[in-house]
Image (cartoon, coloured by chain):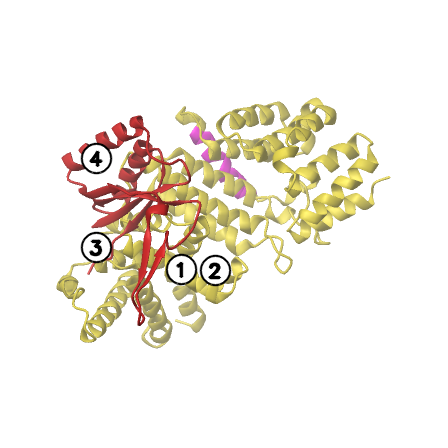
Amino acid sequence: MQYLVSVIDDGTGRATPAEDAAIDVFNERLQAEGHWVFAGGLGAPVSATVIDNRGEETMVTDGPFVESKEYLAGFWIIEAADLDEALRLATEGSKACNRKIEVRPFLTA
Amino acid sequence: MSGTDVREAITRAHHEEWARVVASLTRRFGDLDIAEEAAAEAFATAVERWPADGVPPSPGAWLTTTASRKAIDRIRRENKRGGKQQEAQLLHDDDPPEPVGAIDDERLRLIFTCCHPALAIQTRVALTLRMVAGLTVPEIARAFLVQETTMERRITRAKAKIKTARIPYRVPSAEDLPARVSSVLAVLFLVFNEGYLATGPGTDPVRHELTAEAIRLTRLIRALMPDDGEVAGLLALMLLTEARRAARVSASGELVTLAEQDRGSWDVALIAEGHRLVRERLAARQVPGRYQILAAIAAVHTSAGDVRDTDWSQVVALYNQLVHLDPSPIIALNRAIAVAELDGPEVALAAVDRLQPRLAGYHSYHAARADLLRRLGRSQESRAAYDKAIDLAGNTAETATLTRRRGQLG
């Protein structure tokens, strides 16, 4: 079972070197214990571009699709047996990156 | 067997077997929704068949077997429509019935799943009342004064989240257990309190069906986890509170304070049972949690045949212990109310006033102030505090008492 673990930033900006180091330790643990699928940090929302090609003409818009004080700063995709395990990992992840975190399941077939 | 006997047998089976049937079907089919629907259908079938066929020798086994057949029917129907993922589970069709011990464990799994902290507290309450207590959706909606469709949606969403996010169906690991048990107890306490001090203009001030349900579920948890001190504490607290129910609302529909209650109408059997549990916890010599301390406070009150015999120094000592454990301002308020009996209203008022920034929106804060100001002869200020308390109170009987008290001010 895979879960998307989103890192929510509310204006603190880029991670500090200490946070980066803690994230590295956490990532190594995820890999060692077989929970790691993928992870990455994202550029600030101002770097986003929205494309809408549902109509006749492609619309290109500068900026994120939703403006808000809180935004997605990065994410993990983890493998966990169930929500209890996912929440336990996310609890440590939140401590490591020093940010709020959202856990959401991927749909299974 | 008469029609009344059959009806009673069905009611009893519903009380005793509902959670077992839902729990064992959930484990077998891995789906709360299927389990709930099949259990409901099995009971409906019992209502139809038992009056004619007689009550089966083992109602629980009959209900589980019937519900399993209904569940398999549903899964077959759904498979015919395309989905094949349930097929494998049909292989378990010929499972022998579960031994009783294992099923007891499954009810515990059901409770922990329904009270999972990833669900909102109101959702946990609704789900527990539906899945474990077997209340119908309209009954739960009425209990919490929301529309039936709203309650239905809340329960449906919760079931979907449990499935999609894979909230596990098991008793939590030892490291998670204390936090998870406290989540379960919070749900039961909420159900009890809503029954004991019902909110809303259209309801009875005391909702016996909710307090009774909360006690029944807490007894079940107690039977399943006999060594847990907080479970025993919560059960004792509920029993010692429920024991005073008959004395709690006056003939004229006012809420009667502990000090003014007719202690002769307290339920001595419930008090004896509650005191027994409190003594058992004291003998265990473990550091008590908040429910055990609250139960001990209730035990001190219910030990006094007359309010003047109350051991207030013991009550305040217990509150001191509780404040240490739970810094909530409501606990501090109740402590101050006890302090008034020991050190006088002036000392208590100073303690209550310190809580103003955190409790200004809480009716009991203003009611406590009003009472202390009245005892100090400060009628003007007391009246203003009663006004605020009446404004904020949600319980009809409480409003009636506060209004009378305000009217009696000189």
Residue at image mark 3: B98
Q: Chain of mark 4?
A: A
- The kind of residue tagged 2 is Ile
- The magenta span reads B268-281
Write down the quadrant of residue B367 in the picture. Answer: top right
In the image, taking residue B151 as reference, residue B247 lies left or right, namely right
C-alpha separation, residue under disc 2 versus residue under disc 4? 45 Å
Residue beneath disc 1: B155
User: Residue B390, percent across and down?
Assistant: 71, 47
Q: State the residue position of label 2.
A: B140
- The image quadrant where one finds the N terminus of chain B is bottom left
Question: Who's the residue at 52% across and 34% down the image?
Answer: B294
- Which percent across, then down, holds residue B404? 78, 47
Residue at 83% of width from left, 40% of height from top? B409
Secondary structure found at label 4: helix
Marks 3 and 1, how far apart in space?
Answer: 28 Å
Mark 4 nearby-residue class (10 Å; few <14, some 14–19, many ≥20)? some
| Residue B276 belongs to magenta span | yes
Please determine if labels 2 and 3 lie on a single subunit. Answer: yes
Quadrant showing the C terminus of chain B: top right
**Picture coordinates of residue B401, whole percent (x, y):** 73, 47
Type of amino acid at the residue the image marks with label 3 = Glu
Q: Are marks 2 and 1 in contact (CB under 8 Å)?
A: yes
Q: Amino acid at mark 1?
A: Ile
Q: State how far apart marks 1 and 4 are (Cα).
A: 36 Å
